[in-house]
Image (cartoon, rainbow, N blue to C red):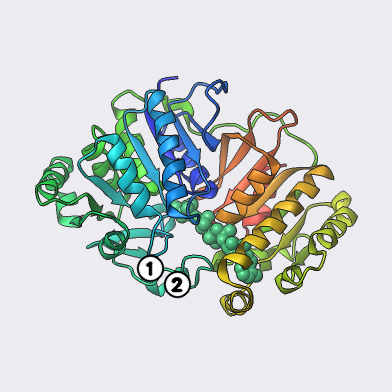
Amino acid sequence: MSLALGCVADDYTGASDLANTLTKAGLRTIQTIGVPEDDRALPEADAVVVALKSRSIPADQAVARSREAEGWLRARGAAHVMFKVCSTFDSTEAGNIGPVMDALRGDAGEAIALVTPAFPETGRSVYQGNLFVGAVPLNESPLKDHPLNPMRDANLVRVLERQSAYPVGLVDTATVARGAEAVAARLEALVAEGKGAAIADAIFDSDLAVLGRAIIERTFSVGASGLGLGLARALVAAGRGTRDAAGAAIGEPVGGSAACLAGSCSQATLQQVGAAEALMPVLRLDPARLLAGADVVGEALAFAEERLPSGPVLIASSAPPEAVRALQAAHGVDAAGHAIEAALAAIAEGLVARGVRRLVVAGGETSGAVVDRLGLTAFLLGPEIAAGVPVLRTAGRPEPMLLALKSGNFGGPDFFGRALDMMA
Ligand SMILES: Nc1ncnc2c1ncn2[C@@H]1O[C@H](COP(=O)(O)OP(=O)(O)O)[C@@H](O)[C@H]1O
Ligand SMILES: O=C(O)[C@H](O)C(=O)COP(=O)(O)O
């Protein structure tokens, strides 16, 4: 395997989001869960996205796991490694974007990391270093209420400098508009100033194409799927991709029954769960009872077992911000989050034991808990359900499954119905 591009993603939904973008841009892409064993046979690929559940764990653990993943990718020919972060820069004041970026940049021998979470296809843009979600700054968007990492500052130069050991500069939109050579020159000037990273403005896909051309000969960068698009376009233009990779198929139907799980509390997921009530039986879990020791998992599996023969069900813990805050006040942010992730993962395991082979999961941390509990190790890319959300087919599992791992903020109100139709 000689990779054109290697990627280390800090959550599983973000990994599939990026793998989807790279596939559409013409790179044969595989998503692995964690770092594969050295003797693991993998299909030929132009790019591999190593998915880690590292966004919300202690920074030293995130750094160690990310460095191991980068080393595996470099050993398979990846001259450029992109650290994939959330398009809404999901992180706390302590990181983990800054610490992981500093470590991977050092391992890569890279003088400066270009950083941009811009992803115009989903309404994420960066202007003068400020991240916008649609028409509003990040700190005025629903991300200000994220259960684990509420985003309270839209200025990413400030945000990243608080997380990194190095000063952070800016490649502004006027520089990007002048093209790849101007961006490259700006990066060299920032290196001379002692900067270790640079937030790059990007509003349109064309800006990301400029950034991809400007850094493709560098060894390391940090971004969301938009930067992945820019890098992929530069690689395909240089003959490093397999142009017919787009529109990957999902192979033969996998059969079995279908179910949906939602742990995301994002505004988009709340709307999608509400819309799903018109399509299928929906069970809304009571996290307070779960944390009080009630057998919420057993109750949910009994609910599902009774109804799965008639069609899909949806089981959700999702709740609006005020309810999330109340539960966290009573039990703590991490304790509440981890307990609910573990419960949804246990429910997923029980659903598969009851014949589910098509599973839709909403939420990045939630997807990580579910996929780890199911012991899934790699995915092939299928068609796109919604921007940033592909159908995934398990690789290496005796009985194949189809999954959709939906980033909390992605997809329209009809997402669950649309996903199930495409996974039939
Ligand atoms: N009702 C709830 N109250 C508090 N926390 C919740 C609730 N439901 C889910 N959570 C937690 O909120 C977090 C959602 O994160 P994640 O799954 O990554 O979603 P997103 O993709 O929207 O960020 C998880 O830790 C999950 O366990
Ligand atoms: O928004 C993105 O770039 C990714 O898809 C992502 O990382 C979203 O994270 P979430 O926790 O699944 O919302």
Q: Is residue 412 visible?
A: no
Q: Residues within 10 Å of mark 2 (few under 14, many from 20)?
A: some
Q: Residue at x 29, y 33 (%)?
A: 234
* Residue 39 percent coordinates (x, y): 56, 20
Ligand 1's quadrant is bottom right
Q: Do tag 1 and tag 2 residues touch (Cβ < 8 Å)?
A: yes
Q: Quadrant of residue 69?
A: top left
Ligand 1 within 8 Å of disc 2? The answer is no
Name the foreground residue: 197 vs 320: 197
Q: At numbered mark 1, what does the secondary structure look like: helix, strand or loop?
A: helix
Neighbor class of circle 1 (other Cα within 10 Å; few <14, some 14-19, many 20+) is: many
Q: Residue at x 61, y 80 (%)?
A: 326
- Identity of the amino acid at label 2? Lys
Q: Quarter of the image containing the N terminus?
A: top left
The numbered mark, 1 or 2, whose residue comes first in the sequence reads 1
From the viewer's perspective, tell me whether residue 14 is left or right of residue 284. left
Residue 70 image point, x, y percent: 40, 35
- Is label 2 in a helix, a strand or a loop? helix
Identify the residue at image location x=47%, y=48%. 61
The answer to whether 20 appears left or right of 177 in the picture is: right
Q: Position of residue 44 (x, y in %)?
A: 50, 21
Residue 188 rendering spot, x and y as whole percentages: 12, 43
Q: Is residue 21 left or right of residue 423?
A: left
Q: Which residue is mark 2?
A: 144
Q: Is residue 401 left or right of residue 4?
A: right
Q: Is residue 123 visible?
A: yes
Residue at mark 1: C-beta within 8 A of ligand 2: no
In the depicted structure, whether residue 333 falls above or below residue 216: below
Q: Which mark is residue 86?
A: none
For label 1, the residue is 138
Q: CA distance from mark 1 to mark 2?
A: 7 Å
Q: Amino acid at mark 1?
A: Leu
